Image (spheres, grey):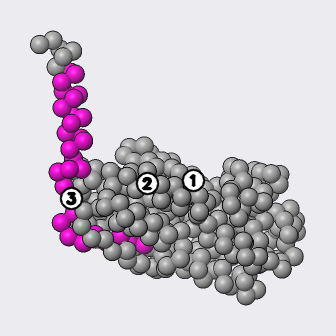
Amino acid sequence: MTVKRYVVMALMLAGAATASWAQSWSPQKNVELVVPNPPGGSNDKTARTVERIWTANKILTGTLSVVNRAGGGGSIAYTYVQQHAGDPHYLVVAGPALLTNNITGASKLHHSDLTAVASLFNDYTAFVVSADSPIKTGKDLVERLRKDPKSVTIGFSPLLGSHNHIAAGLLMKAIGGAARDLKVVAYKGSADAIPNLMGGHIDLVTTASGNVAHHVASGKLRVIAVTATQRLPGAMAAVPTWKEQGVDHVFGAWRAIFAPKGLTPQQVAYWEGALRKATEAPEWKADLEKNLWSDDFTTGEAFRKDLDKDYAGMKAVLGDIGLAK
């Protein structure tokens, strides 16, 4: 047998072994899909969507419970899953807060302390005001921020230094201001920030576009700009991007699934496969459109490299804001 044939056979055997990983392990008890926020936000919607599709399409073998463990800007949930090292029956929905918590010193947990399973989609930030706000456009907001950054109280979740705070800070940077001069209020979740905006307690909210689409459609809120590369569909179709309004500001937040450290390749492969099947389902594609999410399914080394790159970039931004430790 030639060396070339040996190589070909070895590659075929390796491929067969990889394909069989997901078949050589399956859940042996109830699986907890942990959400680091209260019900209603993007992370919770992500978990509920995955649960619904897995159940309806019989993708998951066994039972699944979605568990909300809010607090600490997500750190309570991330730490909870980390404490179950080696147990593949625990998963957690994560966003950029997993990175920013460590950068700001809010948590000692680093994203490498968990197993990165898959990035699912990208979520763009909306700059939202009440329907009767004197801030009518992105230009109005920019003018007020340049004149007096403290004249606009900005709310977001889940804590100082989170990706929604970064979105506001990047706007200030883009218009030549100092991000640390912003007047900001952090809430546990968007479900808390939005009612405070409607009640007139704050002037502006930065949040995932999907969190406010139905309020925009009902006329209760108005989005003055989104951080997307192009206009979003549905209720946001009439909302211009920051770039359209002359401000170089594009910023998105991923949503992903992580597991504890110490999983076997077979266990990781099972969850990668289950999530890939979920994202290929028609229901998932419908929810992407409904929630204004952009498809971004990534696994393995590519996902881990993306995380390291994002960590470095966010650390630089939070350093400008004055929150990096």
Q: CA distance from mark 1 to mark 3?
A: 29 Å
How many neighbours does mark 3 have within 10 angstroms: few (below 14), some (14-19), or many (20 or more)?
A: some
> Where is residue 180 shown, x and y percent of the image?
70, 68
Q: Residue at x 50, y 66 (%)?
A: 97
Q: Looking at the image, is mark 2 or mark 3 nearer the viewer?
A: 2
In the displayed structure, does residue 209 sit left or right of residue 220? left
Q: Which residue is mark 3?
A: 26
In the displayed structure, does residue 281 sit left or right of residue 173? left
> How many marks are shown on the rendered structure?
3
In the displayed structure, does residue 142 sit left or right of residue 306? right
In the displayed structure, does residue 174 sit left or right of residue 292? right
Q: Mark 1 near mark 3, Cβ–Cβ under 8 Å?
A: no
- Is 24 magenta? The answer is yes
Mark 2: amino acid: Ala
Q: Which mark is residue 281?
A: 2
How many neighbours does mark 2 have within 10 angstroms: few (below 14), some (14-19), or many (20 or more)?
A: few
Q: CA distance from mark 1 to mark 2?
A: 15 Å
Q: Residue at x 24, y 41 (%)?
A: 18
